Image (spheres, grey):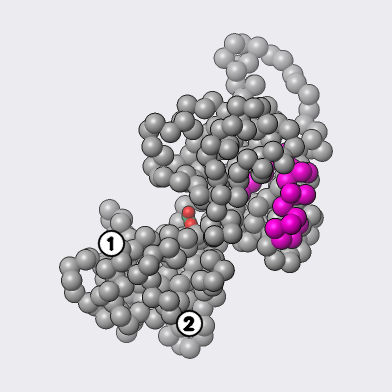
Amino acid sequence: MPKILFVAADPRPERWTTEIERAYPEAEVIVWQDDGRSHDAEYAVVWHPPAALFARERNLKALFNLGAGVDGLLALNALPADLPVIRLEDAGMSVQMAEFVIHQVVERTRDMAVYRAQQRDGVWRIHRPIDRAQWPVGVLGLGQIGARVAKSLAALDYPVAGWVRSQRRLDGIEVFNGKGALQAMLARSRIVINTLPLTDETRDLMDHAFFAALLPDAVVINVGRGEHLVDEALLQAIAKGRVAAATLDVFRDEPLPAAHPFWSTPQITITPHVSARTLREATIAQIVAKIRGIEAGTPASGVVDPARGY
Ligand code: GLV
């Protein structure tokens, strides 16, 4: 009977634990508290766990991250080097992300702000139809989320390219491989969408040179991590008119501090890290299936390579 700890600052953790118990009646599921006790658990399901967890629980076989991005977890000094970390694989996130991104892209390419302003003024005026050739899209990262975003936009006939660190083929997507190809990818992109994992290689990627390389009147959509973006570089690119609009769902500090200039920059649309939520049902089904597999001797997929960072 495996023991599973639930370790997340959730105001109603029982919504998770009862669901896990329902899906896995043989398991014992415990809401972890830092009360100095050890539960001698085999598994932990975590989001931003405290270091004390690793001091108390010495017999964990695997750690399940309640999200796709494991940057926060890997940054913990207390994380034992040999403890397998398993990230969520899609679990309903990529469709949400594709939907969110399409909404933002269409908002710009179909002049929705212009039509909203016209409605306020009672104006009936028809503007030019969309010319997709004017809106080449570049997607940073073609993992499960990035690939779904890229394919969804390609299905709407936008010219789509993707940038990945390793070799990758994706039908209908022009793929640029490796660091040296980033510049070329940006130079053909007017809309750029970041879906990368945060690693030492990708931190601060969106800097002054990045924005300077994009096509004019660029649109920037960041659904990766706040640390990918050099905030000041984006603000300058907007001030100079190089970047026409940005949608930011993730920030270096979350919640975004009240005094941050992003709040008052009209070209920036802010959402509070909601582009792809962790869906309880799909997440639990995935984690339980993986634990059952491990218990039966089958290695789980989605194991993070700490050297790679995702
Ligand atoms: C959310 O940001 C995630 O990593 O899933």
The N terminus lies in quadrant: bottom left
- Residue 189 on image: x %, y %: 74, 43
Give the residue type at disc 2.
Gly
Q: Is residue 199 above or below residue 189?
A: below
Residue 149 seen in render: yes
Residue that extends furthest to the front in the rendered view of this protein:
209
The answer to which image quadrant residue 178 occupies is bottom right
Q: Is residue 141 above or below residue 6?
A: above
Q: Residues within 10 Å of mark 1 (few under 14, many from 20)?
A: some
Residue at screen point 59% across, 59% down:
201
The C terminus lies in quadrant: bottom right
**Residue hosting label 1:** 14
Disc 2 is placed on an element classified as helix
In magenta stretch: residue 188: yes
Dot 1 or dot 2: first in sequence order is 1
Residue at disc 2, CB closer than 8 Å to ligand 1: no
Residue at screen point 27% across, 68% down:
52
Disc 1 is placed on an element classified as helix
In the foreground, 187 or 27: 187
Q: Is residue 11 left or right of residue 110?
A: left
- The residues colored magenta run 176-194
Q: Is residue 154 left or right of residue 28?
A: right
In magenta stretch: residue 13: no
Residue 18 seen in render: no
Q: CA distance from mark 1 to mark 2?
A: 24 Å
- Residue 57 on image: x %, y %: 29, 77
**Residue hosting label 2:** 293
In the foreground, 158 or 92: 158
- Residue 162 on image: x %, y %: 72, 54
Q: Which mark is residue 202?
A: none
Give the residue type at disc 1.
Glu
